[in-house]
Amino acid sequence: MQEILQFHRESQSPQVLDSILEPCSYTSKDGQFLRLRREKIPANPTELLRERVRIVEQDIARVLGRRLQSPAVALLGDARALPESPLEGQPNLVITVITSPPYVNRYDYTRSYSLEGDSSQ
């Protein structure tokens, strides 16, 4: 547990710690709710944190080892009113729209993600 608390104090990425909270607890997300699951066997927090950090390290190494083959452009705004991409018409063009949260009026995300909260403080 001391190792986890030290990681939390020193980490610039609280999301890594957030990612182990549900698997290490007696809760699970069920639609828009966080439910208590008494029969659940929680994961070992230290082992799971080590595994998640290893995954992040692998992801960083993979990204650093790549060179972009073409330029990337990020446009921020209402997807219904974005201007045409400056890369429009280029080969292998990929256009992605990312929304957060994905169903803004459908779920109360404060309930289903209350376990994570703000661990950065």
Image (spheres, rainbow, N blue to C red):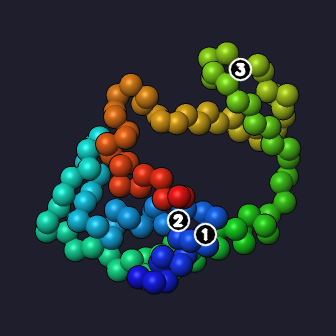
- Mark 2 → mark 1, Cα distance in angstroms: 9 Å
- Residue 120: image location, x then y, percent: 54, 58
Disc ID at residue 82: 3
Q: Residues within 10 Å of mark 3 (few under 14, many from 20)?
A: few
In the rendered image, is residue 51 in sight? Answer: no
Mark 2 and mark 1 residues within 8 Å of each other at the beta carbon: yes
- Residue 93: image location, x then y, percent: 76, 37
In the rendered image, is residue 27 in sight? Answer: yes
The residue lying toward the viewer, choosing from 83 and 111, is 111
Left or right: 75 as drawn, with respect to 55: right
Q: Which numbered disc, 3 or 2, marks the residue that appears first in the sequence?
A: 2
Which amino acid type corresponds to the residue marked 3 in the rendered image?
A: Leu
Q: Residue furthest front?
A: 121
Which amino acid type corresponds to the residue marked 1 in the rendered image?
A: Ser
- Residue 64: image location, x then y, percent: 78, 67
Q: On the rendered image, what quadrant is the N terminus found in?
A: bottom left
Camera-near label (3 vs 2) is 2
Numbered disc 2: secondary structure: helix
Q: Residues within 10 Å of mark 1 (few under 14, many from 20)?
A: few
**Residue at image point 79% right, 27% down:** 85
Which amino acid type corresponds to the residue marked 2 in the rendered image?
A: Val
Q: Is 108 drawn above or below residue 4 in the view shown?
A: above
Rendered image quadrant of residue 111: top left
Residue that numbered label 2 is attached to: 16
**Residue at image point 34% right, 34% down:** 108
Left or right: 30 as drawn, with respect to 93: left
Rendered image quadrant of residue 94: top right
Q: Which numbered disc, 1 or 3, marks the residue that appears first in the sequence?
A: 1
Residue that numbered label 1 is attached to: 11
